[in-house]
Image (tube, grey):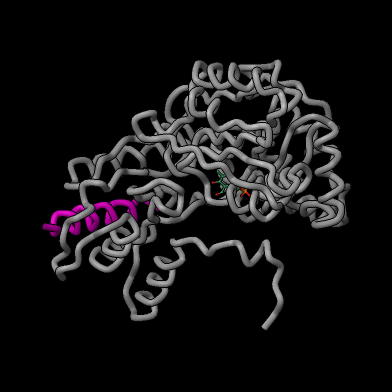
Amino acid sequence: TIALAERVIALKPSASIVARQKVLELQAAGKTIIDLTIGEPDLDTPAHIIEAATAAAKGGDTHYTVPMGTPALRKAIAAKLKRDNNLDYALNEVIVGVGAKQLIYEAFAATLDSGDEVIVPAPYWVSYPDITAIHGGRPVIVDCPEADGFKLTPQSLEKAITPRTKWLVLNSPNNPSGAVYSREELAALADVLRAAPHVLVLTDEIYEHLTYGDRVMSLGEVAPDLIGRLLIVNGVSKAYAMTGWRIGYAAGPAPLIAAINKLIGQSTSCASSVSQAAAAAALSGDQSCVRDVTEIFRKRRDRMFELLDGTPGLSLRKPEGAFYFYPSVAGLIGKTTPEGKVLASDLDVSLYLLEAAHVAVLDGGAYGMSPYIRMSFGGAMEGIEAGCRAIRKACEALV
Ligand code: PLP
C-alpha cells in the first residue's frame, strides 16, 4: 500500500460517484443514458476565439508566459471588470489561472492556516469544502433553505462568523440552485461584513453572464469599501463555452495576488499561452456571442420548466441564473417504485430515475442540501426534452 498524506485520505469521494458508477454499468449493458448531470455548455467555442488561438500558435506564441498571465490578457480582464462591473483594477491586481478552480485553490493555499474557517453557504459547488479541507481549513457550512431563495441571510452570516473565520464564499449565480443575489441582498451582507474586518470574501462569478433576469451585481460594485478584502473569481469557461481551454482569472488586493502568483509559479508555472490568447480575444472581442449563449440557455430553461411543471413529487422553481434546475423531491420521499423499493433519500431518487427513466441527475446531498436533485440544461434540447418526459413518466409510476 501507498502511504498517502492524511489530508488526501480525509477527502471523501462524493456520494454522486455511486450514481456515476451506475451510469457506467448501464452504458456497458448497452443502455442509452440521457445525461442531465453535465456542468458545461455543449456549445462550440465561437469561431473568432478559435482563430485568435490559431494565430497565436502559428505566430510563435508558444512559450511560457509570466505566472500572472500575459499583459494582453490581464489588460483584457481589467477592461472587462470596468466594462461589466464598473470596477477599477490595476494589472498587478489581476491574475490568470488554469480555470477559476485553480485560483480558488491557490487563494486558499495562500491564506489558510490549520483550523481556519471558510464559510460556505449550502447548497454549494462541491469543490469549496474540499479545497478548504485540502489546505487544512475547516468548512463551515451554512444552510440556506429554499424559503430564503437558497440565499445566505445577514442573520445566518453573522451567526457563522467566528474569530477563526478567514473567508466567506459567495457564488452568484449559484451552482446548483440558480439563485442570484440582488443589490439589496448584497448590501445587507456587506453590513455584516463591515463589522467583521478580519473576514475575506471570495465571490465566484463564473456564471455572471448566464442570467435570465437583471444584470448580476458584484459585491465590489455594491460595497466599494470592501474591495480591499475581496477576491473576485471568474473565467471564460461558461460564458464563452471554453471549459477545455482552462482559463480563469481573479482580481483582488495586490499582496494576495502576489502570493497566488508565487504559488502558480511553483505549480503550473503559467496557464497555456495559446489559451491565454484565446481568452483575451473572448474578453475583448464582440460580446454578442455571450448574449447568444444566454438566449440558448433561456430557451432550454423555459422548455425544461414547461415539460416538468406539474410532475408529481417535484417542486420546481425557475433558476434565475446558471444552467441547473434544483427541485425539491420531498414529495417523492417515502414513495414506492413499481419494483417495490421505497425511496428514502434524494440519492435513492436519482438512482431510481437512472434505472427507470435512464436519465442521470445528481442528488442534492452532493451539494450539501437534501432532498433535492440537480438537473442540468447545459446539454442539447433533444436530450432535455427526452429526459424530462422520461422523468415525468417515472415519477407518475411511483405509488
Ligand atoms: N465555480 C463554479 C461555481 C463552477 O460551477 C465551476 C465549474 O463547474 C467552476 C467554478 C470552475 O470553473 P473553471 O472551468 O473556470 O475552473
Magenta portion: prevailing SS class: helix
| Figure quadrant of residue 299 | top left
Residue at image x 75%, y 33%? Answer: 76
Q: Quadrant of the N terminus?
A: bottom right
Magenta region: 380-399
How many numbered discs sit on the rendered protein?
0
User: x and y percent of residue 211 in the render?
Assistant: 47, 32
Instruction: Using the rendered image of the protein, determine whether residue 258 is visible from the camera's viewpoint.
Output: yes
User: x and y percent of residue 107 in the render?
Assistant: 73, 43
Instruction: Using the rendered image of the protein, determine whether residue 51 is visible from the camera's viewpoint.
Output: no
Q: Residue furthest bottom?
A: 1
| Figure quadrant of residue 253 | top right
Where 356 falls versus 172 (above or below)?
Answer: below
Q: Quadrant of the C terminus?
A: bottom left
Viewer-proximal residue, 195 or 79? Answer: 195
Left or right: 166, with 181 as reference point: right
Q: Is residue 397 magenta?
A: yes
Q: Is residue 279 magenta?
A: no
Q: Residue furthest left?
A: 399
User: x and y percent of residue 87 in the render?
Assistant: 70, 21
Where 166 falls versus 394 (above or below)?
Answer: above
User: x and y percent of residue 4 in the render?
Assistant: 70, 72
| Figure quadrant of residue 6 | bottom right
Residue at image x 49%, y 23%? Answer: 155
Viewer-proximal residue, 59 or 110? Answer: 110
Where 17 falls versus 95 (above or below)?
Answer: below
